[in-house]
Image (tube, rainbow, N blue to C red):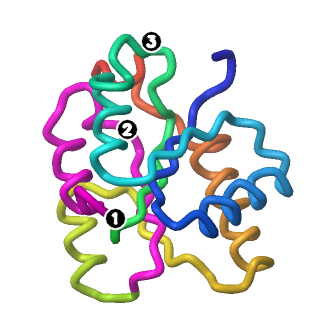
Amino acid sequence: MSQNVILLVEDNPDDVLLTERAFKQNNIMNIIVVARDGAEALDYLFARNQFAGRPKEEDPVIILLDLKLPKVDGLQVLKELRAAKRTKLTPVIVLTSSSEERDMCESYSLGANSYVRKPVDFVKFSEAVKQLELYWLVLNEGPPGGNGC
C-alpha cells in the first residue's frame, strides 16, 4: 500500500458509510481499513489470525475507535493497544456517540489521544472529519521512526 492506512473500528454499517463518505467529500485519500468489532481490530493491529502476515507497512497511522463494540469493547481495545510496543504510540481518536463522562475519562486514562463525539448531522460530521484530517494527517508529527521510539 502506498498510502497511509487509517483503521476505522466501527460496528454500525451506517456510521462506516457516513465516515467513508465524509473522507471522500474532504478529499482524504488514505486507505481506510474497517474492523467491525474489537476482536477484528486487535487481529488487524497485531497481524494475527486472518491478518497473519500483513506487512508492517500497513500499520495504521491513526485509529478511529468506537467504544460500543461487539466481542471486545473499545476501552479494552485501547488498553491492549497501549500495552503493546507495536501500537503504544499510534494515535487513537475515540470517535463515538457516547456523551458519558465516564467513557471520556476512561478513554483518556487508557491513553486516547482525542475524544470526538459523532455529530448526528452529516454536514457537522463531515466538518469534524475535515478537522481530524487536518490535524492528525497533516499538522501532527508522529514519533521519529514510527512507533519504534
Residue at horizontal 22 percent and vertical 84 percent from the top = 102
Q: Are marks 3 and 2 in contact (CB under 8 Å)?
A: no
Badge 1 local density, few (<14 within 10 Å), some, or many (20+)?
many
Query: x, y (%) of residue 10?
Result: 47, 59
Badge 3 local density, few (<14 within 10 Å), some, or many (20+)?
few
Which stretch appears magenta? 70-98
Comes first in the chain, label 1 or label 3 = 3
Comes first in the chain, label 3 or label 2 = 3
Please state which of residues 12 and 89 is positioned toward the viewer in this rendering.
Answer: 12
Residue at horizontal 80 percent and vertical 78 percent from the top = 123
Is-magenta flag for residue 78?
Answer: yes
Q: Which residue is mark 1?
A: 69
Query: x, y (%) of residue 64?
Result: 48, 54
Q: Is residue 45 above or below residue 148?
A: below
Badge 2 local density, few (<14 within 10 Å), some, or many (20+)?
many
In front: label 2 or label 1: 1
Q: Which residue is mark 2?
A: 90
- In this rendering, would 143 be left or right of 74? right
In front: label 1 or label 3: 1
Comes first in the chain, label 2 or label 1 = 1
Query: x, y (%) of residue 125?
Result: 69, 74
Marks 2/1: CA–CA distance:
20 Å
Q: Is residue 130 above or below residue 115?
A: above
Residue at horizontal 73 percent and vertical 60 percent from the top = 130
Query: x, y (%) of residue 69?
Result: 34, 64
Q: Residue furthest left?
A: 83
Residue type at the position of mark 3? Pro
Residue 55: image tag: 3
